[in-house]
């Protein structure tokens, strides 16, 4: 089930983001109710009436698996995927190549959503949320000197974590949590297992988290260097982007760099 829908529009000739919208869904109990919300948005939001040169869609879920590129075969994507995930009916298994890590990200999207968006847009490409998350962390740290960095992207009921060393993806995983204690436990367990120093290793936060969040306030007791990610300097932004924290829609606003 979808918990919300966000979109942005970029003018590629100017390298400028000109629009951003976010819709949060309330009282969603099924895929059908999510689709009803989407239909309502597409029927009423005039920005979505435009014809777009290309459309990129991120589907956020915990149903994905990473496979090393040398071991990957397109014919076996379902075998890889269902080795780690339960098999569900009426879903499509897709994949993204993560160029800077020599890995393939295999994920699924319910067929109903695929059909909905394919009917709305002619030229659409699908991504898992961890694809721009991993790719951009590796891109921005090329040729940088550091020991380790930790990136955390928080959603409403789960969060993704990656750990990188120079030009290398060391760790990626996703964790479902119920409260701030779960959040801190999973994150600090990563520090312990990888022998990261919490007083030295920086942590970069993105997504649905602020300095007022319980999750932030509990981890700052253990981790010294915590930062919220900033918007990329590779693009210009319309005034509307001044109204939101820069780290909220980081994956979506950096997806264009993953081509």
Image: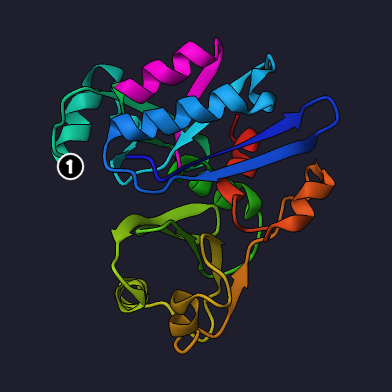
Q: Is residue 126 magenta?
A: yes
Residue appearing at x 80%, y 44% in the figure? 237
The answer to whether residue 205 is seen in the rendering is yes
- Image quadrant where residue 86 sits: top left
For the C terminus, the quadrant is top right
The image shows residue 88, relative to residue 28, as above or below, that is above
In the image, is residue 81 above or below residue 52? Answer: below
Q: Does the rendering let one see residue 107?
A: no
Q: Which residue corresponds to the image point at 41% horizontal and 48% vertical from the top-left? A: 26
Task: Please state which of residues 70 and 130 is positioned toward the viewer in this rendering.
Answer: 130
Residue 123 as seen in the image, left or right of residue 130: right
Query: Where are the magenta residues, as a range?
Result: 112-129
In the displayed orientation, state which residue is furthest to the bottom. Answer: 221
Where residue 55 sits, quadrant-wise, is: top right
* Magenta stretch holds residue 258: no
At 69% from the left and 57% from the top, the residue drawn is: 244
| Tally of numbered discs | 1
Where does residue 17 sit, x and y in percent of width and height? Answer: 76, 38
Quadrant placement of the N terminus: top left
Residue 147 percent location from the top left of the image: 53, 70
Q: Nearer the viewer, residue 176 or 222?
A: 176
């Amino acid at each position: 089930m979808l918990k919300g829908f966000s979109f942005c529009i970029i003018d590629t000739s100017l390298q400028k983001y000109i629009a951003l919208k976010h819709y949060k869904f309330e009282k969603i109990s099924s895929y059908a109710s999510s689709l009803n919300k989407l239909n309502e948005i597409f029927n009423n939001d005039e920005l979505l009436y435009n014809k777009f040169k290309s459309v990129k869609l991120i589907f956020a879920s915990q149903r994905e698996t990473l496979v090393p590129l040398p071991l990957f075969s397109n014919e076996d994507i379902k075998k890889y995927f269902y080795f780690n995930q339960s098999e569900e009916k009426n879903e499509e298994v897709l994949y993204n190549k993560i160029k800077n890590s020599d890995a393939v990200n295999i994920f699924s999207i319910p067929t109903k959503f695929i059909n909905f968006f394919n009917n709305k847009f002619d030229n659409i490409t699908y991504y898992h949320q961890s694809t721009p998350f991993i790719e951009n962390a590796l891109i921005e740290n090329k040729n940088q000197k550091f020991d380790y960095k930790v990136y955390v992207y928080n959603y409403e009921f789960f969060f993704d974590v990656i750990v990188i060393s120079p030009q290398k993806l060391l760790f990626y995983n996703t964790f479902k949590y119920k409260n701030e204690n779960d959040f801190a436990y999973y994150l600090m367990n990563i520090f312990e297992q990888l022998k990261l120093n919490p007083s030295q290793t920086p942590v970069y936060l993105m997504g649905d988290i602020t300095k007022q969040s319980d999750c932030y306030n509990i981890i700052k007791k253990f981790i010294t260097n915590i930062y919220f990610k900033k918007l990329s300097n590779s693009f210009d932004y319309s005034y509307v982007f001044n109204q939101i924290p820069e780290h909220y829609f980081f994956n979506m606003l950096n997806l264009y760099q993953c081509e």
